[in-house]
Amino acid sequence: MKNVFRVSMVAILSLLAVSCGTTQTASEALAENEFRNEVYKEIATDQTKFKDFMQVVHNSAEGDKWLMKDHMQMMEDGKMMKVMKANPEMQEKMKKMMQDKMEKDPEMQKKMMDKMKAKMMEDPSMKEAMMQNMHAEMKANPEMAEKMMDKMIQFLHENPEMMDKMQAKMKAHQAEMKNNKKQ
């Protein structure tokens, strides 16, 4: 009877010791792919958890940097445009936010303009689409058109050689218009 009691006690103590040692840290638990993917799915499908997670990301300098890098990659890959086209309200809101940010941060505006120029030079169809979009926006928003013209005039005054090219182009265009009227 004493042996059975001793074996039982040893077994119980062993089980207790083993069960106490199974606690894992977050990084140990997330090392398991299946468990990690389940956690990701749970966060991605629950708005409250997702917002909490994004708050944690934004409070981390490293996390915020990775998030911005991913956002930029989505923009470059065209994924952001697909998301925006599916949600016009979000598209307008993002467009407004970007305009506000660029007005407040000239460095960001310059970087965005440089990227847009590079993309337009790589892809003529994109350049044409952007030009058509800009013309449509100018027709729909005279105030914006006025601001753009003011900026263009300022740019031309700061770059005399560009001013000369523009004037020559305007004269050629006017001459062409006169010839078309005569015919």
Image (cartoon, rainbow, N blue to C red):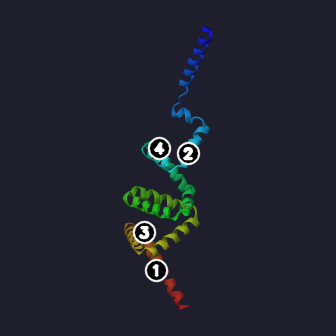
Q: Earlier in the sequence, mark 3 or mark 2?
A: 2
| Vertical arrangement, residue 62 with respect to residue 102, above or below | above
Question: Which mark, residue 63?
Answer: 4
C-alpha distance separating marks 1 and 2: 64 Å
Residue marked by disc 3 = 161
Q: Which residue is mark 2?
A: 42
Instruction: Decide if residue 34 is on the left or right side of residue 166.
Output: right
Badge 4 amino acid: Gly
Neighbourhood count class around disc 1 (C-alpha, 10 Å): few under 14, some 14–19, many 20 upward: few
Does residue 79 appear in this view? yes
The quadrant of the rendering that contains the N terminus is: top right
Q: Nearer the viewer, mark 2 or mark 4?
A: 2
Q: Amino acid at mark 2?
A: Glu
Whether residue 64 appears in this view of the structure is no
Residue corresponding to mark 1: 171
Question: Considering the numbered disc 3 on the image, is that residue within a helix, a strand or a loop?
Answer: helix
